[in-house]
Amino acid sequence: MENVLFLPSAFAIIDIWRAASLVMEDCRVFGSGRIGVECRGGKVEATRCTFGRNGSDGVHVMGGQVKECLVRNNGADSLYVGSGGEVTVMGGTIRSNKRHGVLAGGGKVTVAAAEHSEEEGTADRPQTVSSGNGGHDWAAAAGGEGLYEGMQACEGGLLNAD
């Protein structure tokens, strides 16, 4: 899907079951009564998308990649990675969510640091920013794992990299 605006819904706006995959580019997902995008078993590849003002999580996934997305003002976590899932976050902004910015809820989250090109001061990928969330900006629940390049390690299951 490219350049799609999803309108408000009482349930998840996009709900994927089993081993399906979803590729989203330049999409906006707003106003779900629950979760913006929920993927239980498949993978979501989201690039330059906006997820906001959803009743619960902005994105709730088991696997995939979130690249250069804006995830804000959601009722719970911006990005929740479920048990056994693996997600890579590259670039983008995560802010003003009611609970955590990124939560590895039994899954594994890798936040890739910016990679610099040969020319000093330029970046091939923008830095990922998570701030102003109600709970921790980066968190790992019991059984969850976060690999945050250039940041301190998770202690006691929680990490706040402000």
Image (spheres, rainbow, N blue to C red):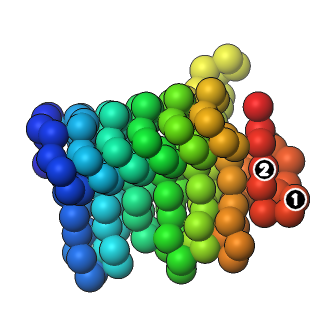
**Label 1: which residue?**
155
For the image, the number of numbered tags is 2
Please report the residue visible at 53 percent of the width from the left and 29 percent of the height from the top: 96
Please report contact status of discs 1 and 2: CB closer than 8 Å, yes or no.
Answer: yes
Query: How many angstroms separate mark 1 from mark 2 (CA)?
Result: 6 Å
* Side (left or right) of 84 relative to 110: left
Q: Please state the horizontal and vertical placement of residue 15, each as a whole percent of the image.
A: 22, 64
Tell me the number on the disc at residue 159: 2
Please report the residue visible at 32 percent of the width from the left and 53 percent of the height from the top: 35
Q: Amino acid at mark 1?
A: Glu
Q: Residues within 10 Å of mark 2 (few under 14, many from 20)?
A: some
Q: Quick check: can you spot residue 117?
A: no
The extreme top residue here reads 121
Q: Please state the horizontal and vertical placement of residue 157, each as a whole percent of the image.
A: 78, 63
Q: Please state the horizontal and vertical placement of residue 57, each as a whole percent of the image.
A: 41, 50
Q: Quadrant of the C terminus?
A: top right
* Side (left or right) of 72 relative to 107: left
Is 110 located above or below residue 143 in the figure?
A: above
Is 31 located above or below residue 45 in the figure?
A: above
Instruction: State which quadrant residue 19 falls in.
Output: bottom left
Q: Amino acid at mark 2?
A: Leu
Could you tell me which secondary element the residue under label 2 belongs to? strand
Please report the residue visible at 86 percent of the width from the left and 48 percent of the height from the top: 152
Pick whichever, 134 or 102, lies toward us. Answer: 134
